[in-house]
Amino acid sequence: MSTDTCRLPRDFFARSSVEVARDLLGCLLSFGGVTLRLTEVEAYAGEVDPGSHAFRGETPRTRPMFGPAGFTYVYFTYGNHWCLNLVAGQEGTAEAVLVRAGEVVEGRELVRARRGTVAERDWARGPGRLGQALCMGGEHTGRDFCRPVLGEPIDLVVAEPARPVAAGAVATGPRVGVSGPGGDGTAYPWRFFLEGDRFVSAYRPGTVKRRRATAPRS
């Protein structure tokens, strides 16, 4: 899994994030001694997508999304989890695919040590759990995984599926935990997953956070 012969080329990722997301299902993602079969992903389309981190423009955190396809965008969420995205589209469009869930097919002992007593089904079922299974961190954002820099201690490889995924096996729906217009499953049915696969996470709609009312000053 670590050889360049099986690595998906940059052209694969230099397409619409929606196209890339669909085609990533069943692919094998290898990082730090662990390999996952991808079962669930979500597409995000930058400044035209109200659900995207890049919707309001570039920030230091989102800068990797605005670069060329084939780079990682890793972000911290809920004060506890690192989530992995694969940058897609053309440079400047800030498109990316969130890697939401997968089945561990190699490196099981590593993941068992990282995830403790958690059931195997939940080792990488959800983006935060997946990040923990891979031992992903903020230092891994902005990494070129199509043509990695020589000497990097850990390499990330995205490779073709071991077997093709049938079109009928792919389901779509609203993105998990996205509130507001970006969570509209009719306008943005950009969550792609393998129908009936036990390693797919549960759908949860987004909730709008309301500010606490404060007493008027006297």
Image: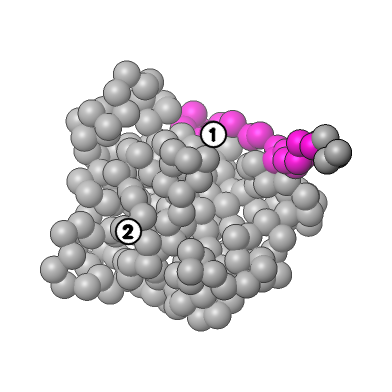
Question: In the displayed structure, would residue 173 be above or below residue 111?
Answer: below
Tell me if 151 is positioned left or right of 67 in this view: left
Q: Amino acid at mark 1?
A: Ser
For the residue pair 212 and 55, the one nearer the viewer reads as: 212
Q: Quadrant of residue 160?
A: bottom left
Q: Amino acid at mark 2?
A: His
Residue at horizontal 31 percent and vertical 44 percent from the top: 134
Label 1 sits on residue: 201
Disc 1 crowd rating (10 Å Cα; few below 14, some 14-19, many 20+) is many
Q: Main secondary structure of the magenta part?
A: loop
Tell me if 161 is positioned left or right of 30 in this view: right
Q: Can you name the residue that lies furthest to the bottom here?
A: 91
Tell me if 92 is positioned left or right of 27 in this view: right
**Residue 110 in the image, given as x and y percentages of width and height:** 21, 35
> What span is in magenta?
196-214
Question: In the displayed structure, would residue 25 be above or below residue 159?
Answer: above
**Residue 45 in the image, given as x and y percentages of width and height:** 63, 66
Residue at horizontal 65 percent and vertical 54 percent from the top: 190
Disc 2 crowd rating (10 Å Cα; few below 14, some 14-19, many 20+) is some
Q: Can you name the residue that lies furthest to the front here?
A: 218
The tag on residue 140 is 2
**Distance in Å between CA atoms under marks 2 and 1:** 24 Å
**Residue 32 in the image, given as x and y percentages of width and height:** 22, 49
Residue at horizontal 66 percent and vertical 66 percent from the top: 55
